[in-house]
Image: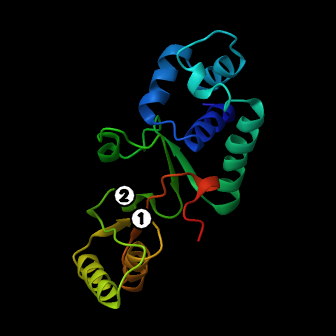
Amino acid sequence: MPDKELAALCALNSLYVNKCRCEAFLRTHGTLSDAWDDIANSKQNREDAPLFKERLSSALLERAGYAEIELADKEGIQLLPFWDPRYPSLLSSIVNPPPLLYIRGDMASLDGQNIALVGSRTHSSYGKKVATGLTAALVDLGYTIVSGLARGIDRECHLSALDNGGKTVAVIGSGLLNIYPSS
């Protein structure tokens, strides 16, 4: 698919448009970029228009779409859209999978035994001790640690996985230009 298609997906992802909606756009418009253009330029009161018309513009496509592709390239991050055959099948089978994955590092980490560890952003020293100990034990058993890359317990789990020679996967739900929390 051309860069404009990936840019449209990046921009739609920045607006939290889910995979199901993206698939509906593909069915009705053929491409996401055609859907973007059609909705942004539509004078009709279409079903999609009230939700997106004000937010869809060529300026946003440039800012959120192409800028995200450029940033990903600069940072060595691979963009993996839901239509790519390498998109993880287990992830694709959940009710509402993300339309776009951002990958830096070894994508094979997604293929093994994964376990999600998450927790409070503010934690006690006991919480940290339990999280890092649990993570170390799971890494020893061959698990890849998956978490949200938030501060607090999520961060401690990622660091513990790396400190113990394990693999870690950070799931960021908001795209590269909208990382939350920014710290």
Element class at badge 2: helix
| Amino acid identity at mark 1 | Val
Q: Nearer the viewer, residue 154 or 87?
A: 154
Left or right of residue 152: residue 61 = right
Which image quarter is the N terminus in? top right
Image point (54%, 61%), residue name: 104
x, y percent for residue 182 = 60, 66
Image point (45%, 26%), residue name: 23
- Closer to the N terminus: mark 1 or mark 2? 2
- The residue that disc 2 covers is 110
x, y percent for residue 117 = 31, 68
Element class at badge 1: strand
What's the mark number on residue 57?
none
**Rendered view: 162 above or below 27:** below
- The residue that disc 1 covers is 169
| Amino acid identity at mark 2 | Leu
**Which quadrant holds residue 153?**
bottom left
**Rendered view: 149 above or below 100:** below
Nearer mark to the viewer, of 1 and 2:
1
Give the colour scheme of this rendering. Answer: rainbow
**Rendered view: 20 above or below 134:** above
Q: Residues within 10 Å of mark 2 (few under 14, many from 20)?
A: some
x, y percent for residue 15 = 58, 40
